[in-house]
């Protein structure tokens, strides 16, 4: 049996547990490291060792630890979603925030910026022009039919 030389690793069970607790609570890596009283550099060094060992087909405490971390981080997201869903039942603002992020095309906040052309006149937006075009097309059904047919061909 070979004896390791140098300072003992800070990758102890206590450090692992603290990191896991923080990551399950959705802390950032940096905050989790601070909570576990290790440097970010130590965490990333262990992560690199895990990658090297895994690439070499070697099982090690680093590989196992980072597999546990992956599972812990995967647990954090559904947990937060469930907490948000419960909060949304009590506060409609939370529900709205979820809808805005989940379905931005339907519920997202739209900001309109008025732009001007070279003459200083406001440029027309699509929503301004479309009703006018449809109005003209209603007066010219043959042209409307031709344009709709061409549009289908382009799809």
Image (cartoon, helix red, strand yellow):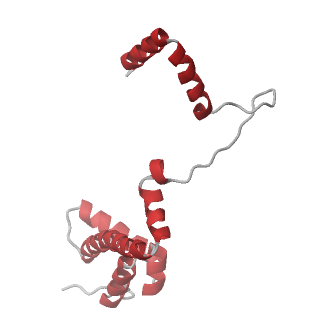
Residue 52, given in percent of the width and then of the height, sits at: 30, 64
At a point 51% along the width and 12% down the height, the residue shown is: 140
8 on left or right of 106: left
Q: How far from the left and from the top, in percent, is residue 79?
A: 33, 74
Q: Position of 29 compared to 137: left or right? A: left
Would you identify the image quadrant in which residue 54 lies? bottom left
Seen from the viewer's position, the closer of residues 32 and 59 is: 32
Furthest toward the bottom, the residue is 14
Q: Nearer the viewer, residue 75 or 59?
A: 75
Coordinates of residue 6 in the picture (x, y in percent) = 38, 86
- Would you say 143 lies left or right of 80 here? right
Residue 47 in view in this figure: yes
At horizontal 55% and vertical 54% (from top left) the residue drawn is 109
Towards the viewer: 82 or 37: 82
Name the residue at 35% across, 78% down: 24
What residue is drawn where x is 26% and y is 74%?
A: 68
Q: Is the C terminus in the top left, top right, bottom left or bottom right quadrant?
A: top left
* In the rendered image, the vertical position of residue 106 relative to residue 147, given as above or below: below
């Amino acid at each position: 049996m070979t004896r390791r030389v140098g300072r003992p690793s800070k990758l102890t069970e206590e450090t692992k547990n603290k990191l896991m607790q923080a990551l399950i609570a959705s802390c950032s890596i940096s905050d989790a490291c601070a909570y576990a009283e290790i440097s970010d550099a130590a965490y990333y060094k262990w992560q690199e060792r895990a990658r090297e060992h895994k690439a070499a087909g070697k099982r090690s405490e680093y590989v196992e630890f980072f597999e546990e971390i992956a599972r812990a981080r995967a647990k954090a997201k559904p947990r937060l979603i469930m907490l948000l869903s419960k909060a949304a039942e009590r506060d409609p603002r939370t529900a709205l925030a979820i809808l805005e992020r989940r379905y931005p095309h339907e519920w997202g906040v739209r900001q309109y910026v008025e732009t001007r052309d070279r003459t200083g006149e406001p440029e027309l937006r699509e929503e301004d022009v479309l009703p006018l075009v449809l109005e003209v097309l209603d007066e010219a059904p043959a042209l409307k039919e031709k344009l709709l047919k061409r549009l289908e061909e382009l799809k």
